[in-house]
Image: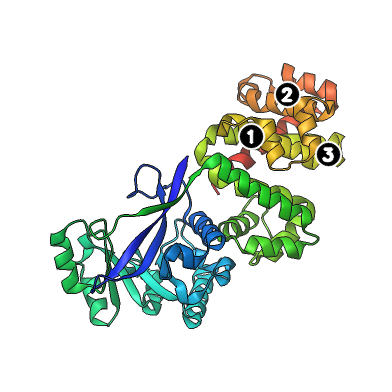
Amino acid sequence: MSFLIAKQPIFDKKDNVVAYEVYLRKKGNMLEYPKEVPYNRSTHIILEILMEHGVNKIGEGKKIMLNVSIDSLLNKAFENLPPEKLILELIPPQIQVGTIVINQALKRAEKFKESGILLAASYDILLKESYQQFVEEAFLITVDFHHLTDTKVKSLKAKDKKLLITKIENEKQYNKAVEIGDFFEGNYLGAPYVLKEFETAPYLKNTLVKLIAILHSAQSIKEIARFISYDAGLTAKLLRFVNSAYFSPIQEIKSVEQACSMLGMKNIRNFIFLLAMNDYISVENPVLWKKALIRAFLASQMAKRIMPDLEDAAYLMGLFSLIDEILGVDKISFLKEINIDKVILDGYTGKHKKLREILDFASQLEEKYPTIQSSEDPYNSAILTNIEKFIGINRSELLQMTKDAYEKAEYILNL
């Protein structure tokens, strides 16, 4: 998967550039958003670029407008950027959110507005009744040229909301837009400029390098929770994960710190790896990613019973077992570059025989489970009998572990 970050100028009625919109697009098609990338992940990627290169440099001294899904307003990384340089164009989240998230996001929007950030409401927000409070907070309404006749747009213009008209493609459209709007954007006025291109493999590698460094240096649950809270996508997925049937908590978990405390220092590291990788690899190759997830769950459960000290290593061996096929990289080189523990590398190369055996048995169960299940006597299948003989885990327990691993993998894919 390839995508890029581009910027496009926004003009006022005097043809002055007043801001730049910065957005994610599919490589080879500047008009298409890469649907494989969740909106909140897109926000995280763009914020990283802005913090790396500086808002003033990218915006050439002007304001910068970002497309931000309502749930992404909770991302604390916005606090690291100069508020007077930001316009946040609010768009609906991809996955419906509840009233708790909406209320939290609304409070953040009000706080941002007080700090000097300008809020814009996208045309799609206008169409959602549950998001009308965000429209009230907005200084600006963004609408593409083809929706100018919508009565909602006209009514908001009458309420003194400023109007940014986008996707202006020719002189005729521009002349019409100038009669109605206040600000203007489109290829007729100024084409997008590519800031940076991304490929999944190197981007994911950089993400994991940072993740490993932070997780290894963190001394407490609170430190890890603080790190997660800067990533809206990771925060949303973690909270959805811990409140799911996978864990079935007695009471709803409402904060990242609560979620981390519930999982514990040992488990949170593994789950963060999984959730961080899931956004990218699940769309790059969902079939192989599901196989890797199953292997991770199986390997960790086997190790837990026979080599508990290596449970985490066995889990990560399963998780990265097909990374070479999924991303088209050399597995050992990739894992060395992200500073993965040496014991895991030794497991792959066979230097650590026990870890290698566990991964091999987990892979066999993952591959043969459908055949085992469809057989007349699953408990007495040759594979289960052989694995029981070598590692001493009862066949019925192995079969249940495999069933659970398949169900967990399916759940993760649908997060």
Q: Is mark 1 on a helix, strand or loop?
A: helix
| Residue 98 in the figure: left or right of residue 120 | right
Residue 106 x %, y %? 48, 75
| Point 74% across, 41% down: residue | 340
Frontmost residue, 319 versus 335: 335
Give the labeled residue for mark 3: 310
How far separated are the C-alphas under marks 2 and 3? 27 Å
Q: Nearer the viewer, mark 2 or mark 3?
A: 3
Give the labeled residue for mark 1: 292
| Residue 19 in the figure: left or right of residue 295 | left
Check disc 3 and give the amino acid type.
Answer: Leu
| Dot 3 crowding, Cα within 10 Å, few <14, some 14–19, many 20+ | some
Up the image or down, 357 lies above or below 243; here it is above
Q: Earlier in the sequence, mark 2 or mark 1?
A: 1
**Does residue 403 appear anywhere in the picture?**
no
How far separated are the C-alphas under marks 2 and 1? 24 Å
**Does residue 96 appear anywhere in the picture?**
yes
Residue 234 x %, y %? 60, 56
Q: Earlier in the sequence, mark 3 or mark 1?
A: 1
Residue 286 x %, y %? 53, 36
Q: Which residue lies furthest to the left in this view?
A: 172
| Point 21% across, 74% down: residue | 154
Q: Are marks 2 and 1 in contact (CB under 8 Å)?
A: no
Q: Is mark 2 on a helix, strand or loop?
A: helix
Frontmost residue, 183 versus 270: 183
